[in-house]
Image (cartoon, grey):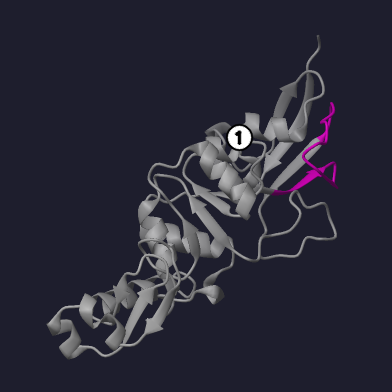
Amino acid sequence: MQLKTAKLRFYEELNDFLESGKKKKAFFYQFSGKPTIKHVIEALGVPHTEVELILANGVSVGFDYHIKDGDHISVYPVFETFDVSPIIRLREQPLRNIKFILDVHLGKLAKILRMLGFDTFYKNDYTDSEIINISKSENRIILTRDCGILKNKSVTHGCYIRSEQPYEQAPEVLQRFDLFSQIKPFHRCMICNGVIESVSKESVLSKISPKTAKYYNEFYKCSDCGKIYWKGSHYFKMKEKIERIYKFRHPDLE
């Protein structure tokens, strides 16, 4: 059977998934039969959740498009911050009620996202199937450093985390989904993800040390696990970390 040939070009961060000879340039792809463009994209190593727009010969197409001999295919990354509704979106809509579920390798990132106020599910023993099922049932975005889970056909919203450092991973997520304006520091429990609420000092006296009671008057409590919070030295250290994250959006800030 004679092979067919299409020319493909991937843009911006999608190149991170390609082998070196295919990065940042057009290349020829040979195939037989009638594969869908989704099959071709993932065969080249790019998870479908990272793709927002596909042009075949200048026309917007969906994942179910069957590539043809001589096609010119352009593949673009997710545009969560732009309105591309006049053309074919590859998922129904961006998720504006942002909720996350993280894989087992991103425990530190989970705590940071909770510190920033984002609804973040994480357990260090989640299986891939559990992550996918929870993502589907609760419309949670999967954050992972495992490309394999993002290639599952039932995953609609996911993000491959490129950095290995938690305090670089957090700004990466915020920039990807345009979330800097939605930060609500100390709104969620870093331990269990529950919502933190203000409580009276009297209601927590039996659960704090006499020294803490002597020096602090404002207290907060997780509505789920009951953990008590107050604005001690740990609070100011976390504020410094949050300010450092903000600087990724405005690097010129002193």
Residue topped by disc 1? 22
Q: Horizontally, is 204 left or right of 180 in the view? A: left
Query: Magenta segment range?
Result: 52-71
Residue 130, visible in the rendered structure: yes
Q: Nearer the viewer, residue 35 or 112?
A: 112
Callout 1 amino acid:
Lys
Q: What residue sits 42% from the left and 71% below the top?
A: 223
Magenta run includes residue 16:
no
Q: Position of residue 105 (x, y in %)?
A: 39, 45
Quadrant of the image containing the C terminus: bottom left
Q: Which secondary structure class fits the magenta region best?
A: loop
Q: What residue sits 61% from the left and 36% below the top?
A: 151
Q: Horizontally, is 210 left or right of 142 in the view? A: left
Residue 247, visible in the rendered structure: no
Q: Horizontally, is 184 left or right of 225 in the view? A: right
Q: Position of residue 93 (x, y in %)?
A: 74, 58
Q: What residue sits 54% from the left and 33% below the top?
A: 19
Q: Position of residue 112 (x, y in %)?
A: 39, 63
Q: Looking at the rendering, which quadrant does residue 243 occupy?
A: bottom left
Q: What residue sits 34% from the left and 87% below the top?
A: 200
| Residue 31 versus residue 52 in the image, above or below | above
| Residue 243 versus residue 73 in the image, above or below | below
Q: Which residue extends farthest top?
A: 1
Magenta run includes residue 66:
yes
Quadrant of the image containing the N terminus: top right
Label 1, residues with CA under 10 Å away: few <14, some 14-19, many ≥20 = some
Q: Looking at the rendering, which quadrant does residue 22 occupy?
A: top right
